[in-house]
Image: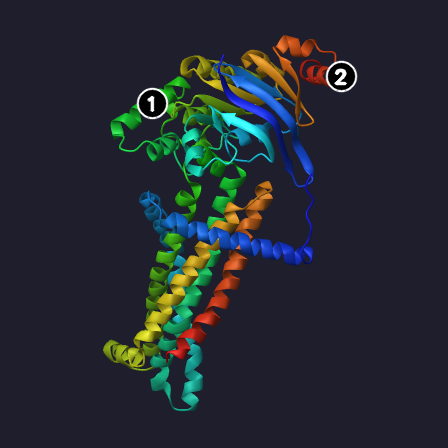
């Protein structure tokens, strides 16, 4: 399988605090990689480096065979068109309707589109997330789950090759979580994306992950299928599992 | 691991870093202003928002300033038997100083805080990051449009404030003595020269730019959640007002050389 993201010996720190320490991992075409880890272990930092929002201090990282080290702004923007980023809090533009939110990246990156083509693209992605009726609504009128769906739709409108999900089920009720997990699987199937899903929700990890990687102390300590990882008797893994499935 | 060494004291270092960041932000603004793909629709939207949000307050403040300033000046001039100078004196004060200053201080409170809070809120809710990852330049869309809108709209509001202040002056003058509108206008603008108008325009443009750029800078660099948004809005107002007074002194000094 082709590698779409290659990360080798990555380091990132903020001030005196080390976040990623010698982190290495590859993501293959068409797979959903779930990155698990406690809060503050650098999961979100990792995908922000992949999206070019943060730069690594040391190490190698390449996305779709394009190195992110010393990349120009023009090259980064071209690469970003192939990456979709679903934010933890959806990050919908408050002052715009759902339609304007969805059109926003489209009309600014693809010139000379007719009104008809724009409307067709907007309706198509809204349909794929099951929210056609929300077209004229403002983000403040949507529920948490609907906002997540619209956030995902906004990235899908550019037909990305890679999807990055930052805590897709955080703050949602269990039923909506299952719906979002299903949507992530549908996106993979219908848009043929490779994805990284950042979460500490093991139900989500089990439902969407082809492979699971666990981040401890800024480093990927365990990788494999969900079952392989959680067969491990390491106390950190066990406590993670017990917290999700026993205490909760 | 990286550690930070202070060049001077931590306070001076932070001030210098802030000064450099501000200068970089202004350079970035000019760079993006003269690049392609100007967001004209958003610029018009911002002009409308700035003008519309401040219009009522500026109408009232301008009118009251003109009326009260005339009323307060009358007794002093009466002492010297110089009440006929009243329209001329008050008009010079309004055009040279009061209209630009009153308008900009109102806009610093209303527009500056609004820009700081809006961009700050967009920053902490990752909306600015969302623009960046969708390959849209947030500086071009958010900063350039807002700064240009305030630079252009605030001078227009300044002239409107001047007009409302003159209405207040005329009302007060006509209440005190029997004078026709044409005689009032002649007396009022008799001593106004082009330099006075240019001074007002220069002041209004620089105050407008200051309000826009400070609001955007503070909002764009907000952090620490809702607390950071409040701080950004507050700092936008305080710093804009501070800079406006410094600019006032500077512009008055420079324009006086040409008198």
On screen, residue A196 versus residue A110, left or right, reads: right
- Do the dots labelled 1 and 2 sit on one chain? yes
Image quadrant assignment for residue B140: top left
- Label 1 or label 2, whichever lies nearer to me, is 2
Which x, y percent locates residue A194? Answer: 48, 18
Under circle 2, the secondary element is helix
- Mark 1 or mark 2: name the one nearer the start of the chain: 1
Image quadrant assignment for residue A167: top right
Q: CA distance from mark 1 to mark 2?
A: 48 Å
Letter of the chain that mark 1 sits on in the rendering: A
Q: Is residue B152 visible?
A: yes
Mark 2 sits on what residue?
A235
Mark 1 sits on what residue?
A123
Residue at the limit of the structure toward the left, as seen here: B182
Q: Is residue A5 above or below residue B104?
A: above
Image quadrant assignment for residue A226: top right
Residue at the limit of the structure toward the bottom, as seen here: B80
Mark seen at residue A209:
none
Mark 2 burial class by Cα count in 10 Å: few <14, some 14-19, many 20+: few
């Amino acid at each position: 399988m082709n590698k779409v993201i290659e990360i080798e010996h990555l380091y990132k720190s903020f001030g005196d605090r080390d976040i990623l320490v010698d982190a290495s991992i590859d993501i293959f075409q068409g797979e959903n990689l779930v990155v698990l880890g406690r809060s503050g272990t650098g999961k979100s930092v990792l995908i922000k480096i992949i999206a070019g929002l943060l730069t690594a201090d040391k190490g190698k990282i390449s996305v779709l065979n394009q190195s992110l080290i010393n990349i120009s702004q023009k090259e980064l923007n071209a690469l970003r068109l192939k990456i979709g980023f679903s934010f933890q809090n959806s990050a919908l533009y408050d002052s715009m309707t759902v339609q304007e939110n969805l059109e926003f990246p489209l009309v600014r990156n693809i010139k000379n589109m007719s009104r008809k083509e724009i409307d067709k693209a907007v309706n198509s992605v809204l349909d794929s997330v099951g929210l056609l009726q929300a077209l004229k609504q403002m983000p403040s009128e949507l529920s948490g789950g609907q906002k997540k769906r619209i956030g995902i739709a906004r990235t899908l409108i550019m037909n990305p090759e890679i999807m990055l999900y930052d805590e897709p089920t955080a703050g949602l009720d269990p039923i909506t979580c299952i719906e979002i997990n299903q949507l992530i699987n549908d996106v993979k199937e219908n848009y043929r994306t490779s994805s990284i899903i950042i979460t500490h929700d093991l139900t989500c990890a089990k439902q969407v992950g082809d492979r699971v990687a666990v981040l401890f102390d800024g480093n990927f300590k365990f990788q494999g299928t969900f079952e392989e990882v959680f067969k491990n008797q390491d106390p950190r893994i066990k406590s993670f599992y017990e917290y999700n499935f026993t205490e909760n | 691991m990286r550690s930070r060494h202070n060049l001077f004291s931590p306070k001076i270092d932070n001030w210098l870093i802030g000064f450099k960041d501000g200068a970089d932000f202004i350079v970035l603004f000019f760079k993006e202003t003269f690049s392609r793909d100007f967001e004209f629709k958003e610029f018009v939207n911002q002009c409308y928002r700035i003008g519309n949000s401040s219009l009522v307050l500026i109408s009232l403040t301008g009118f009251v300033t003109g009326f009260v300033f005339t009323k307060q000046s009358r007794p002093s001039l009466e002492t010297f038997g110089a009440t006929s100078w009243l329209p001329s004196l008050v008009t010079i004060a309004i055009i040279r100083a009061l209209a630009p200053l009153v308008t900009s201080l109102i806009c610093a409170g209303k527009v500056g805080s609004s820009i700081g809070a809006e961009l700050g809120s967009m920053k902490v809710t990752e909306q600015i990051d969302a623009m960046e990852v969708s390959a849209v330049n947030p500086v071009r869309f958010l900063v350039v449009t807002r700064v240009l809108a305030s630079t252009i709209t605030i001078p227009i509001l300044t002239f409107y404030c001047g007009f409302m202040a003159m209405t207040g002056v005329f009302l007060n003058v006509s209440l005190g003595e029997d004078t026709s509108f044409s005689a009032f206008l002649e007396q009022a603008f008799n001593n106004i020269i082009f330099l006075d108008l240019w001074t007002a325009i220069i002041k209004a443009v620089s105050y407008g730019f200051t309000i826009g750029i400070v609001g955007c800078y503070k909002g764009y660099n907000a952090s620490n959640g809702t607390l950071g948004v409040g701080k950004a809005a507050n700092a936008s107002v305080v710093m804009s007002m501070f800079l406006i007074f410094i600019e006032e002194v500077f512009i008055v000094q420079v324009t006086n050389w040409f008198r």
